[in-house]
């Protein structure tokens, strides 16, 4: 298989794994595709964010900003199957309700949602809604794309530095160590969106996300010794929310 064909398979594998979008049958499936596909996670974020931005701008022609943002959020939740929000809820339940490593992993693996998970989802979704609804339309639409792309870039950075802690799991094929070259490709795809229309805001956001990445990573290691697939979803949601809040704070100051 030549390189362009192989990379296209990796992209479609990422699209099929991280979204509900159907992929062509010729793509097939191999376990090693999933690990190689991780480099296209930020590109999937660009597409999801772009879809959300289009829904937002279209809805804005008919509805107030708050309703348009909610419809955009619903569209992105639908296309991803709430993949990362599920990780946020599972981690909130596990980290909030367990004391030992084994109990944390057991609760995280439980598909049922508890009080911590429900509260985390409500607070995160409400903050996204209010933050995006408070910005001007052009800023909001661009911020949706930038946040979906960059948050996924920072989330998969843990594949370079932390260990996957489950012997088995849905994320196991993805969670092999990522090479520096693969991550650089992901960063080139996912991070430049932060620097428009204000490169200074982009720099501030990168610094804030870098600090968050460090402390979140330390927390994962302290609690469970590494990360799980749910941890990546949890981190992606926190990074996405941080981008919105940083952007709003910048334009409000």
Image (cartoon, rainbow, N blue to C red):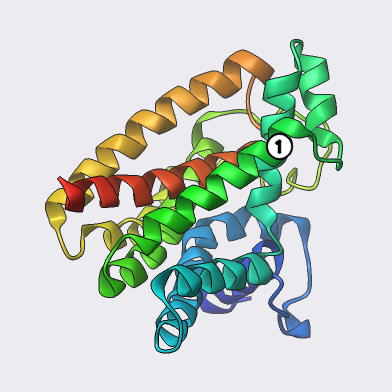
Please give the name of the residue rendered at 14% of the width and 55% of the height, measured from the top-left corner: 199
Q: Visible in this render: residue 185? A: no
Left or right of 8 in this view: 91: right
The spot of residue 18 in percent (x, y) is: 66, 62
In the depicted structure, whether residue 13 falls above or below residue 121: below
In the displayed structure image, the side of residue 82 where residue 221 appears, left or right: left
Residue under the point 44% across and 75% down: 50
Residue 104 placed where, x, y %? 76, 21
In the image, is residue 34 above or below residue 106?
A: below
Residue ID at (43%, 75%): 53
Classify mark 1: residues with Cα within 10 Å, few (<14), some (14-19) or many (20+).
many
Note whether 82 is above or below 100 in the view shown: below
Q: Can residue 95 be seen in this view?
A: yes
Percent x, y of residue 95:
68, 23
69 with respect to 106 (left or right): left
> How many marks overall?
1
From the viewer's perspective, tell me whether residue 144 is left or right of residue 167. Answer: left
Name the residue carrying label 1: 117
Instruction: State the image coordinates of residue 251 (x, y, percent, origin top left).
Output: 18, 53
**Residue at 46 percent of width and 59 percent of height:** 148
Name the one closer to the observer, 182 or 242.
Answer: 242
Location of the N terminus (image quadrant): bottom right
Q: In which quarter of the image is the C terminus?
A: top left
Question: Which SS class for mark 1?
Answer: helix
In the image, residue 177 above or below residue 132: above
Closer-to-camera residue (197/149): 197
Residue extending furthest toward the top: 100
């Amino acid at each position: 298989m030549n390189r362009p064909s192989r990379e296209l398979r990796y992209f479609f594998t990422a699209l099929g794994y991280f979204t509900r979008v159907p992929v062509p049958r010729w793509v097939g499936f191999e376990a090693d595709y999933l690990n190689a596909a991780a480099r296209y996670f930020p590109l999937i974020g660009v597409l999801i964010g772009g879809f959300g931005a289009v829904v937002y701008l279209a809805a804005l022609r008919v509805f107030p900003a708050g309703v348009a943002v909610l419809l955009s959020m619903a569209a992105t939740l639908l296309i991803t199957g709430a993949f990362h929000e599920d990780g946020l809820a599972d981690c909130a339940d596990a980290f909030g309700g367990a004391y030992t490593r084994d109990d944390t992993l057991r609760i995280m693996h439980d598909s049922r949602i508890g009080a911590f998970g429900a509260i985390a989802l409500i607070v995160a979704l409400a903050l996204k809604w209010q933050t995006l609804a408070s910005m001007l339309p052009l800023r909001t639409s661009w911020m949706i794309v930038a946040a979906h792309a960059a948050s996924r870039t920072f989330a998969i950075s843990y594949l370079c530095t932390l260990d996957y802690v489950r012997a088995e799991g849905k994320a196991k094929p993805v969670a092999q160590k990522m090479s520096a070259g693969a991550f650089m490709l992901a960063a080139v795809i996912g991070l430049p969106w932060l620097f428009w229309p204000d490169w200074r805001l982009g720099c501030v956001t990168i610094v804030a996300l870098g600090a968050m990445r460090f402390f979140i990573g330390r927390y994962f290691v302290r609690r469970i010794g590494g990360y799980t697939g749910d941890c990546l979803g949890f981190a992606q949601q926190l990074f996405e929310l941080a981008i919105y809040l940083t952007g709003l704070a910048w334009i409000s100051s």
